[in-house]
Amino acid sequence: MQNTSPSAVCGALTSPGALPPATVSRPGRQVAEGNRQPAAIRPPLPDRALAGRRVHPLHTAAADTVPDRQALCELLYELAPAPAALGIALGVPPRRLLAALSWCDRNSFQQVGALLRAARLPIPVHELAGRLDRGCVRATQVATQLRSLAQDRKVYWLYSRDQLFFDELVSVLAPLAGDPGWLGAALGVPPARLAQLRVQAAPPDRRLAIRTMVDEDILQRRRSSLPARSCRQWLDVLVRAGVAGEALAWVAQRWQLEVPPGYGSWHGYRQALADTVADALMAGGQQAQETRVPLWQAWVVLRDHIEQPGCALALGQAPDPELFTPQEWHQVGLCALLTHAQSLGEEGQHISGSTLARLVRSRCVPLRFRGRWQCQPPAAPTASRRLHPSDLPCLVFGVAEAGRQALEMAALLGVGGLDNSRQWFGSSAEGRALLTWLRISRRLPGLETGHLVRLFGLFDKRPLLEKLTGTSDAHQPLAPAGSLLADRAMAFSHLAQELSGQPARVQQFISSHQVEQHAGYRVLACSEPWWRLLNAMALDPLLLKAWHRSGDDGGPPQHRANAGPVPVVAVDEETLEKTPAGCPRDYICPISLEYMTDPVGIAEDNGRTNYFSGRQLMRALTELGPVHPLTRRPLLPQDVPAVDQAHLVRINGWRVRHPELEEEGTAFVPPGYQGT
């Protein structure tokens, strides 16, 4: 019998539950005496044979023998296919498979919070930091953050789980959630409680899941008046489920089946199915938005890359990277695929062609397939939207120095970049970059594409801008649709402008505060000093405070280096136009409605000058687009002038003479004023 065409492999293009031709139910449980694989290379499977004595090609009457249920369950358990992958091959609806994958929805903040709630309090903060110092590089970085945070907040003991410091501590410890046993021991969690938490977070028993799936398949086929699956059909299921070629060879030998003619090995037989499916998808043009790709075919193409974090991201899921082992990421990817398929309805047995194209662009298919799919790039966006997990791979793949770019963006947004070398998918620059972008997206859930477009343009990150929008135009209409960037992120974007414009002050600060020894500074080894300092300050609130203390008044970035003490002079108060509260209008920022400490004057067409807080104006231009907040005429960030020092003197003089207008009537003292 000749069977050399790839399209003949296992009935490759039939549905997962379809019955191949010439199927006869012949129960048989004789023990084969010959042709056993040597023990040195045989996996530890059950001794019971599942088919006849003679070796047969796949398509023979002997291949139609029905395997014993108990031995089949043991065999499937030892082969270790993920139950969800087995379910896809059997055509089980995703909603049922997802019920057993609910454990994939882990959250590092919740997990650290649970550990802290189970810890024995009180805990000396310095003692906890010392325990963390004895861990990995990342734990040492977290220990540094913890000490700095405790000193900044003046908290030296953890007395209560309700204090504000507790929530901040959860955020600091979140990167260590991937090893709850070690972190729990450092926190002093009782061993019994720690074991209980592990059980609650563990995946369900795989043996039970496989046994249930086999029983339900037998029952379903009986209800449909179909015979139980034969050895040939179960081998077809194993091929579809993604069982490796070596394991398929051992199963075939146990079942006394030969490799079909035309295939040199069971690995080649398995590979032929993937090639056949890929050819069918290409022939059918399965890349358009409206096309539907059968779920089992998508799985056959993706199965060897499903454990990559980029695969889950391309499918619209953003799992917490701190919480899963390499083995678990395979099931996390499966969960993302099933979740996406279920969201499309119709029993979730397909994905869209556009999703398949996105997966190809994210390099989630084998290399031999990538060149065969000529996917069109997505259309350039015309409006800002919430950053989607599927956007993250495009900010990594094909970007030069992707790891450095991602770490710089983490610093720029106030999240701070950490050492990623210990993460299993962080062994490559792309893996480290993905991990960093995942951390950014989880810490800044309101981040929009418009925010990133503005920042990419301001800090000359053209490659990232082109990847996100398809164009290098930083002034396209992508203003955020309504979500304001977090205050901390806005503050750090302004701080970055401050640092980049003062290289001499940056270098002096680095030397005087020994910032070279800071873990956050060393992470960005290939970046300019001001980027490295920015990252260190994102991770260390004390360092950030030290920088602000080294300035004089918090004025705009590029004009603070040479500012000296601000003298207080008198002004003609009778000429000042007042607000209803009695404050001069030109001294109050029209955006924040507070006294300005960094006034900048914008000349208007009528000859009048409108004054704004420099920081508030830059924030408005970054968030809402390059337009004047009052007149709506074009105004670019680079057109904002320097701080008007003379006007600042007038503001400070007024505030000194009118303490009754200050909060709680407290007298105002200008920064650096020596007084007499």
Image (cartoon, rainbow, N blue to C red):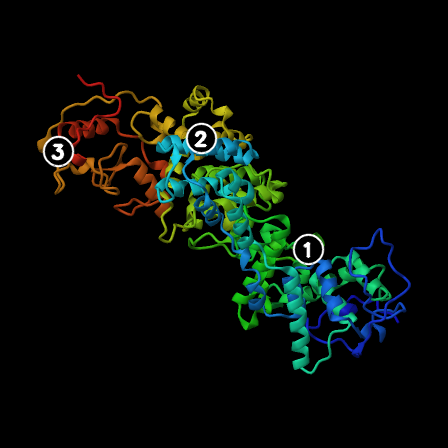
Q: Which amino acid, by three-letter code, is at mark 3?
A: Glu
Q: Secondary structure at mark 3?
A: helix
Residue shown at the point (66%, 81%) measured from the top left: 224
In the image, taking residue 612 as reference, residue 44 lies left or right, namely right
Q: Residue 119 bears which disc, if any?
A: none
Q: Nearer the viewer, mark 2 or mark 1?
A: 2
Q: Which residue is mark 2?
A: 126
Residue shown at the point (16%, 29%) measured from the top left: 654
Going from N to C along the chain, the mark reached first, 2 or 3, is 2
- In the image, residue 457 lies at what x, y percent? 45, 41
Q: Nearer the viewer, residue 64 or 451?
A: 64
Residue shown at the point (56%, 72%) measured from the top left: 347
Q: Which residue is mark 1?
A: 304
The answer to whether mark 2 and mark 3 are in CB contact below 8 A is no
- In the image, residue 26 lies at what x, y percent? 81, 78
Image height check: is 71 above or below 182?
Answer: below
Q: Residue 660 bears which disc, if any?
A: 3
Q: Secondary structure at mark 1?
A: loop
